[in-house]
DNA sequence: CGTTTCCTTGAGGGCGGTCAATTCGGGTGG
DNA sequence: CCACCCGAATTGACCGCCCTCAAGGAAACG
């Protein structure tokens, strides 16, 4: 099937292989050379569509595969003994979910699509086999894990910021960076998650989250139009993210 | 040097090799067979003493080695742009620090001894070399990373618990489990960190932390005598850890 | 166009931060 | 062994932020 013979865009993207994938420079393919990349392709099912609110995997079910976000967004959440859902992470294009479940062998959280998303499924046992013949894959994996731990620490920082505004500002800055897929801040980006999800993630009531958004707009740090966020004063936003006690005079 | 010829206990423990170490079943040696373990020993400096408040490594300095806690305890903290210290983790015997710094190549946090501690230093570059000749080391590392991520997620859970009591109860339960080095809860254990450190870690003022301790004692969940904590009602403590809104009648 | 869901805004009360005083414990020196 | 000191921990009083409850408005869906 060639691109020109295919009028259905979805089917076309489904047919994309790892080598031509837009994420290949940072994703799994970067750990392989051209000769070996066929081996990888065999254990990956690429770009399958998952509709909004679709559950990718369930907490406590057997761990079988990692999922890589190709487009769209996921959230993962833990359901505690009281039935309360607790969001543990958001995943954007290029992110890999399921890493924390490898050791235990069952998924520690439930993964759900926030928007219509395309995901690549990587069978873990077969990937582990590949590591034997492809040493560079282990190097890549260890680097990936280290980065995941590092971004986890960033999030610690976010949660231990005391005020609602500083939490939200930290969250938005991290999201802005991640959206850009680089070390720069993307000035305009779309929030794929609801206020409720953000509040849950940051340990805030969703009304408080909404009020924090309003105050960031009042302070002219950001503009918002529904889910579209624009950073209009990056420095002031950074100040908000590090201040535990807001001084309204300074940042009015 | 034999044990009998050595009257100085410190020197004796310094001389311990990886093979006879009490932690060997879960620590790095478990990834090696008897023939290979000599290779490991060559890149590890075992059990060096670090006095209380001694800094093991500094934030932003070049990443060179992982440190394994043999006895005692460490804390790691990030100093933000305002000079405020933010504790990111506590490390007990068997724990490994520095994993999150591998990817960036500089230490993301500062590590400090909470009590007089013995640490094993593992040169990372040489360890990475060893992975080439010892494939099981990669498997072990990936499992370790996954566990670290998982315990990170547990901590997310802890921080997003809303009330001070539920945060502290969750923290104590986690510490109790980690102290026992198993899946069971150690009923009596010593807190190696101060109230201030706990408060910093949990995003609470240290006065609030102290009050939360007092309320857990009032509720007869725990007993405390200075730094010594005894869990006297595990189930009630678990209830405290999951309740967001305390019902004093139920748990009085 | 109606329904549903999400978001925003307001009012009131409780938890936790801040400031402050006191007590407790460990360490030192006489 | 006791007196003293200093840091850590506890406790109290007060106030502000955020949670809760509630209502209204906006956006998304069929």
Image (cartoon, coloured by chain):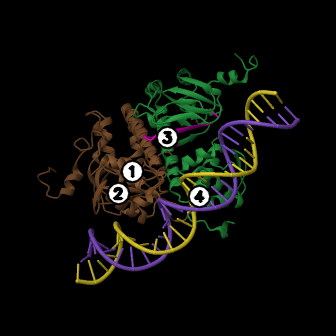
Chain colours: A brown, B green, C yellow, D purple
Residue labelled with disc 4: B166
Chain for numbered disc 1: A
Q: Is residue A107 left or right of residue B53?
A: left
Kindly identify the residue that appears in the image at 41 percent across and 66 percent down: A207
Kind of element beneath mark 2: helix
- Label 4: how many residues lie within 10 Å, few (<14), some (14-19) or many (20+)? many
Q: Chain of mark 4?
A: B
On the question of residue A52 being in view, the answer is yes
Magenta-span inclusion, residue B44: no
| Labels 3 and 2 touching (C-beta < 8 A) | no
How far apart marks 3 and 4 lie (CA) works out to: 30 Å
Badge 3 and badge 4 in a common chain = yes
> Is label 1 or label 4 in front?
1
Q: Give the residue displayed 60% in from the left and 49% down from the top.
A: B206
> Image check: C5 left or right of B194?
left
Label 2 packing within 10 angstroms: few (<14), some (14-19), many (20+): many
Q: Are marks 1 and 2 in contact (CB under 8 Å)?
A: yes
Identify the residue under disc 3.
B143
Q: Which mark sits nearer the N-terminus, 1 or 2?
A: 2
Depth order, front residue of A117/B252: B252
Query: Looking at the figure, which quarter contains the N terminus of chain B?
Result: top right
Residue B64 percent across, percent down from the top left: 46, 26
Which quadrant of the structure image shows residue A212? bottom left
Of badges 3 and 1, nearer the viewer stands: 1
Q: What's the chain of the residue with tag 2? A: A
The answer to whether dots 4 and 2 both sit on one chain is no
Does label 3 or label 4 sit earlier along the sequence?
A: 3
Chain part drawn in magenta: B71-87
Label 1, on which residue? A240
- Are dots 3 and 4 in contact, CB under 8 Å? no
**Badges 3 and 1, same chain:** no
């Amino acid at each position: 099937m060639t691109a020109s013979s295919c009028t259905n865009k979805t089917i076309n993207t489904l047919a994309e292989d790892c080598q031509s994938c837009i994420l290949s420079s940072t994703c799994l393919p970067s750990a392989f050379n051209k000769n070996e990349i066929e081996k990888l392709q065999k254990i990956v099912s690429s770009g399958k569509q998952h509709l909004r609110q679709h559950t990718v995997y369930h907490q406590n079910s057997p761990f079988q595969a990692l999922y890589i976000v190709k487009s769209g967004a996921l959230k993962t959440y833990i359901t505690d003994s009281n039935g309360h859902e607790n969001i543990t992470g958001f995943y954007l294009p290029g992110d890999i979910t399921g890493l924390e479940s490898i050791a235990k062998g069952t998924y520690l959280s439930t993964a759900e699509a926030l928007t219509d998303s395309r995901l690549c499924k990587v069978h873990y046992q077969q990937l582990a086999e590949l590591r034997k013949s492809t040493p560079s894959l282990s190097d890549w994996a260890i680097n990936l894990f280290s980065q995941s731990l590092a971004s986890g620490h960033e999030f610690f920082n976010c949660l231990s910021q005391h005020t609602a505004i500083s939490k939200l500002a930290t969250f938005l800055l991290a999201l802005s960076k991640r959206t850009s897929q680089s070390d720069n801040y993307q000035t305009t980006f779309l929030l794929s998650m609801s206020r409720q999800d953000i509040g849950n993630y940051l340990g805030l009531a969703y009304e408080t989250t909404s009020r924090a958004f309003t105050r960031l707009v009042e302070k002219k740090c950001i503009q918002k139009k529904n889910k579209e966020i624009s950073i209009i004063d990056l420095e002031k936003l950074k100040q908000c993210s590090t201040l535990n006690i807001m001084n309204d005079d300074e940042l009015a």
